[in-house]
Every structure is written in structure tokens, then in C-alpha cells.
Image (cartoon, rainbow, N blue to C red):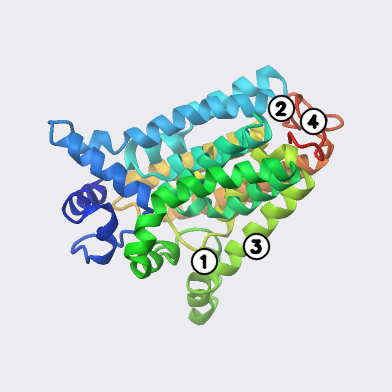
Amino acid sequence: MRFFQGFAKAVSVYGPIRVYEHALPGLPVYNHPPLAGWMLLGLNGLSEFGMSFGTLIRWPASIADFLCVLLVFEIVRRRAAPRTAMLCAIGVAVSPVLIATSGYHGNTDAVAVMFALAAAHLLADRKSPLAAGVAAALSISVKFVPVVVIPALLVGALRGGGPVLVRFAAGFAAVFALVWGPVLATVPQDLTADVLEYAGGGYRLWGLVRFADVFGLPESVIGFMQGGGHFLFVLLCVAAGVRLAWLRPAQLPGVVAATLGLLLLLSTASGLQYLTWAAAGLFVLGFWEGFAYNCVLGLTAFLGYSGRSAVRWSEPVLQLGAAGWIVLAAGLATGVHRLLAARPGGGPAVGAGRAQVSAPRTSQPSGSAAT
């Protein structure tokens, strides 16, 4: 919250476009996409009327979590029993991961995830490709993380036919040009260095780099993983999402959830707020997957934020994080298996149970222009 308050003051001085070309003493790298700058400008203005900035910065993520509750309910309701949809929605509503990262940390990850899931829902379930393109562009304009799902969304639109792809691309291009255009035209190099090429911090608290450190891999290997090598993991996530979207376009919300979860699984950066990436999405893949993830990593987030520092985890938190990584891997494996078990044309999976999520009941064959 203190960092965001510092960013907001900088944006009010330099503007949301020129802020990228200025050093910000005492603050980390300003690695937030252009729309975040306009949001901070507005929140800083509201704080001048006596409203607490600490409260204001938590509003966007908290509202996004509420919208994710509705999104997850709608997505699951079309693919499983109403009881399962209600359980999944309640799971998102009471998620300790989201309570910690949105209600306490106040970062923007939840907003980006909400727009990414909304884009998939609008495209696959609502048959609204123009609105889906707008939501997709907004997702990467708040935080750049959902860029890994954009190719999958494009493939989903392509599978719907030419008109669907054109309308999706038009919505995406219009918002992208409006939000990103002025910054790309003014400070392209600073934006590229601070946002597009940002690799995360050098902490070794989570996932692959944590295991590499524990098992004593050479420093050169860990340095490569956290440096240029992290792009290889990103490309792997993109490739997996594209493949799943091509095979199961009617399952696009689950594809987006799986791709974001895979990005977290393979992430070489460490941050408690990153746990947001899979908190709601795993409930799209299945209730028990979401439940297990949010229980284990919710406790990780709670203890991590309760310690000395959110980037200095105690040994119990590190062990919980490792257990949560395994839970995430297992949840992705079973969730993706369920996606692939669904009929390509959109029918329910054979033997789908009450706590499983299959294909949308109202979807049309994947070759139709409405998919």
C-alpha cells in the first residue's frame, strides 16, 4: 500500500504517461501497465478529499473479487450442477488467498485475473466477441501477467469463425490503442524495460527456483532461470493455452484458468500476491482443486503477511509454499484432464460428477460461428 501511495504521488506529478521515464527514489520499479497509472491518478485525487488511500487502493481488487464470484458461478453453472456452481462461487467469496492479497495487500492482480476470466466467459459462453476483446485488452492494461492467455483467446475466437475473430480483434485493438498508444508513442523504451521485460524480484521463495536452491543447483542455472530463461517458461504457458484452446474452444474459461495457474506453477518470481493468479481459476477447473489450493496457500499467504516481511518467509511458510506448489500441480493435472475429457463439440464429459466441471450446456459445435 505504501509503494502504491508513492506511485500515485509520482503519477500525479509526472502524469500516467511520463512516469515511466523518471527514477522514483525509495520505490521499486514501476512495472505497472498504463491503465494502472490512470487508476492511481484517480485514487490519489479521491484521497485529497479526505478518503484513506490505504482503503481506496484495496477497492479495485476487492470489487474484482466480488465480480469473480459471479463469473465463477456463471461459468460453472453452465458446465455442472447448480449446487457445484454455488459451492465454487462461495469458495471464491471466502478464499483466504484473495482476502489476504486483495483485502490486505491491495495489489492489482485480482483485477487482471477478473478481466481475463470475463473475456473467456464473454467469448465462449455469452457469444460476445467484441466485449471479450475489450475485456482481454483491459486485463493486460491493469497488469501484464494475463498476456499469456491472449493467444489462447485469439485461438478461441478463430475457432468461432472469421466474423468472431474480427470482432474480438476489433475490441482488443481499440482498447489497446487507447490505453497503450500514448505511452508507446511517447516513452516506448522505458515502458519496454519496466513493464514488458520485467522478470520479477530475485527472491527464491517459491516454485522452481526454490527447489533449485534447496537441491543446490549451480548459481548460473538459477540466474538463468530468473533472467532470460523465464521467457521459456512463459512461452511454454502460451503454447499450452493455445493447444487447449484449439482442442476445446468451448472450454475457454477453463483454458484461461489453467494457463494462469501454469504460469504461477512455473513462475521464477516470488510474491504472495502472485497466488491470486490461480485462486479463482482453480474453482473453474473443479471444486476440490480450488478448495485444496485455497486452503493450503491461503494459510501460506496469511502466515507470510503476518511475518516480518512479505518477501522474507519463515521456514514453516516456505514449507507450506512448497506443499501448495504440489497441490497446484495436482489441481492443474486433474483440471486439464477434465477439460480434455469434455466432448470437443461442447457436450458434457462422459461420467461428469456433481463436483466436476465439463463443457457448457448451451454451447454449439466448435465449428460454428457462434463458438
Q: Mark 4 points at which residue?
A: 364
Choose mark 1 or mark 3, whichever is in front: 3
Residue at 43% across / 45% down in the picture? 109
- Numbered mark located on residue 355 in the image: 2
Provide residue 207's location: percent of width, then percent of height: 54, 59
Distance of label 1 from label 3 (alpha carbons): 17 Å
Above or below residue 105? Residue 271 is below
Q: Name the residue under label 3.
A: 236
What amino acid does circle 4 point to? Gln
Distance of label 2 from label 1 (alpha carbons): 34 Å
Q: Is mark 2 on a helix, strand or loop?
A: loop
What amino acid does circle 1 point to? Val
Q: Earlier in the sequence, mark 4 or mark 3?
A: 3
Q: Name the residue under label 1.
A: 209
* Image quadrant in which the N terminus is located: top left
Choose mark 2 or mark 4, whichever is in front: 4
The residue sitting at the right extreme is: 350
Q: Which of 77 and 203 is in front in this view?
A: 77
Distance of label 4 from label 3 (alpha carbons): 29 Å
Provide residue 152's location: percent of width, then percent of height: 65, 50
Distance of label 1 from label 4 (alpha carbons): 43 Å
* Image quadrant in which the C terminus is located: top right
What amino acid does circle 2 point to? Ala
What amino acid does circle 3 point to? Leu
Distance of label 3 from label 2 (alpha carbons): 29 Å
Distance of label 2 from label 4 (alpha carbons): 23 Å
Choose mark 3 or mark 2, whichever is in front: 3
Q: Earlier in the sequence, mark 2 or mark 1?
A: 1
The answer to whether any part of residue 292 appears in the image is no
